[in-house]
């Protein structure tokens, strides 16, 4: 087992941790972590920013909104299918080299998106851009774990996820604003600029060391033969879906349920993003100390908040408080998911990171579809939370009866 895999599994003594810090070739760990977070910030801005300009590129390319959503779906498919494939193909590649290669692919995917002549080509280019996400998070978490030292895999993954949560607070609204004033193509060029800055930071501050070398494809594939891995993927896809049963419909929550001006929608989105950032920060630390509490407390907390939204979400103050809480409690659980995945397959930490992100994108689809079903049934806008409640309850029950009991 390589050092990065051991660190990610989180099984070693304090003495070993001090030894790792002593021999690490990292000159400035904070700058290394900043470079990783800047990369995930760029990725998150490209992902969430696309949702904000969907109406713009639909009109410019002469297609309906439903057809334009194919580009959003293609990105998610890139994460679900493309990221694990890239991770496996690049199993032997040093994690530093892999991250730099993924940045190049990210720049290509978003640059071509800005130049797309039609919806068909945009769909293809968004798939390419999406294929970077899971692999980058997986490899980035391995490097972050190496920086922090053994036994801090949850904190490492939370650091990498921090860039994504910041994208929901600042990157996505700013990207949408650029798209509205300068055009959707300029928004993608702005994403390319941030990605280029991240690439330069990674070149400057990522350590060159054999400790970050890859492993064999057989070892990575070995992780896929573990029943626990697939249990955690299902637990994540079901449980995290409620965050998207809420996030996807924040606009209608504000305008149709709370009967407030659409100008408050960005405020609600920012409140939700702040909750995600807080939950992610705390969840990373809990994941390293406790085996199951992060997920059980996170899922349990979000279930309680979904009930409050469903019953009293038409009041704006209550809605905003619950939006913050849903973002915080669900992100509180995600680092524990990553630590559990890696514990089941410690020889394949990068692939486990890619699978985690794939599960989150499956959750995105499940939450949005579940919410759409309840609205179409005529149960009202706030009914989307009950779809999320059912899905997260199933995920929590599955975890308690299988993984936690073992």
Image (cartoon, rainbow, N blue to C red):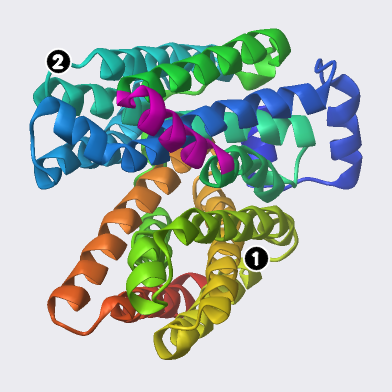
Image quadrant for the N terminus?
A: top right
Of residues 313 and 316, the one drawn nearer to the viewer in this rendering? 316
Q: Residue at x 75, y 61 (%)?
A: 289
The part of the image, by quadrant, that contains residue 71 is top left
Distance (Cα) linking label 1 and label 2: 50 Å
Q: Residues within 10 Å of mark 1 (few under 14, many from 20)?
A: some
Q: Which disc, if any, is residue 117? A: 2
Q: Residue at x 59, y 67 (%)?
A: 324
Q: Residue at x 13, y 81 (%)?
A: 377
Q: Nearer the viewer, mark 1 or mark 2?
A: 2
In this picture, residue 32 sits left or right of residue 394: right
Does the image show residue 16?
Answer: yes
Q: Which disc, if any, is residue 291? A: 1
The image shows residue 53, relative to residue 211, as above or below, that is: below
Could you tell me what secondary structure mostly forms the magenta stretch?
A: helix
The part of the image, by quadrant, that contains residue 335 is bottom right
The image shows residue 210, relative to residue 356, as above or below, that is: above
Tell me if residue 48 is in the magenta stretch: no
| Residue span colored magenta | 170-184
Q: Residues within 10 Å of mark 2 (few under 14, many from 20)?
A: few
**Tags 1 and 2 in contact by the CB under 8 Å rule?**
no
Of residues 15 and 371, the one drawn nearer to the viewer in this rendering? 371
Q: Residue at x 55, y 15 (%)?
A: 94
Q: Position of residue 63 (x, y in %)?
A: 8, 35
Tell me if residue 172 is in the magenta stretch: yes
Element type at mark 1 = loop
Element type at mark 2 = loop
In this picture, residue 197 sits left or right of residue 110: right
Q: Position of residue 336 (x, y in %)?
A: 59, 58
């Amino acid at each position: 087992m390589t050092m990065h895999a051991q660190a990610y599994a989180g099984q070693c003594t304090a003495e070993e941790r001090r030894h790792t810090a002593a021999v690490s070739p990292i000159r400035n760990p904070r700058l290394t972590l900043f470079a990783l977070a800047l990369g995930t910030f760029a990725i998150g801005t490209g992902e969430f920013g696309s949702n904000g300009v969907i109406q713009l590129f639909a009109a410019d390319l002469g297609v309906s909104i439903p057809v334009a959503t194919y580009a959003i779906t293609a990105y998610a498919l890139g994460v679900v299918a493309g990221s694990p494939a890239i991770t496996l193909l690049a199993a032997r590649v040093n994690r530093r080299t892999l991250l730099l290669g993924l940045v190049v692919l990210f720049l290509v995917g978003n640059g071509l998106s800005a130049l797309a002549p039609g919806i068909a080509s945009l769909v293809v280019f968004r798939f390419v851009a999406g294929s970077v996400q899971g692999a980058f998070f997986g490899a980035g978490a391995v490097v972050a774990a190496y920086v922090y030292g053994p036994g801090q895999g949850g904190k490492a993954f939370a650091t990498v996820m921090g860039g994504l949560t910041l994208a929901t607070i600042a990157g996505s609204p700013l990207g949408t604003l650029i798209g509205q004033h300068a055009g959707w193509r300029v928004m993608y060029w702005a994403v390319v600029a941030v990605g280029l800055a991240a690439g330069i930071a990674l070149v400057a501050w990522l350590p060159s060391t054999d400790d970050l070398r890859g492993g064999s494809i057989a070892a990575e594939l070995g992780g896929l033969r573990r029943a626990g891995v697939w249990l955690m993927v299902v637990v994540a896809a079901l449980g995290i879906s409620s965050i998207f049963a809420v996030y996807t419909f924040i606009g209608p929550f504000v305008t149709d349920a709370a009967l407030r001006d659409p100008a408050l929608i960005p405020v609600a989105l920012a409140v939700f993003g702040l909750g995600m950032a807080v939950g992610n920060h705390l969840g990373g630390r809990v994941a390293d100390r406790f085996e199951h509490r992060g997920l059980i407390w996170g899922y349990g907390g979000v279930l309680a908040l979904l009930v409050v939204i469903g019953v009293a979400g038409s009041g704006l103050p209550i809605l905003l408080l619950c939006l913050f809480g849903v973002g915080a409690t669900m992100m509180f659980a995600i680092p524990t998911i990553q630590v559990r995945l890696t514990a089941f397959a410690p020889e394949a930490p990068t692939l486990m990171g890619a699978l985690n992100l794939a599960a989150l994108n499956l959750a995105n689809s499940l939450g949005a579809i579940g919410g759409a079903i309840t609205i179409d049934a005529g149960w009202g806008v706030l009914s989307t939370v009950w779809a999320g409640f059912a899905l997260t309850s199933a995920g929590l029950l599955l975890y308690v009866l299988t993984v936690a009991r073992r």
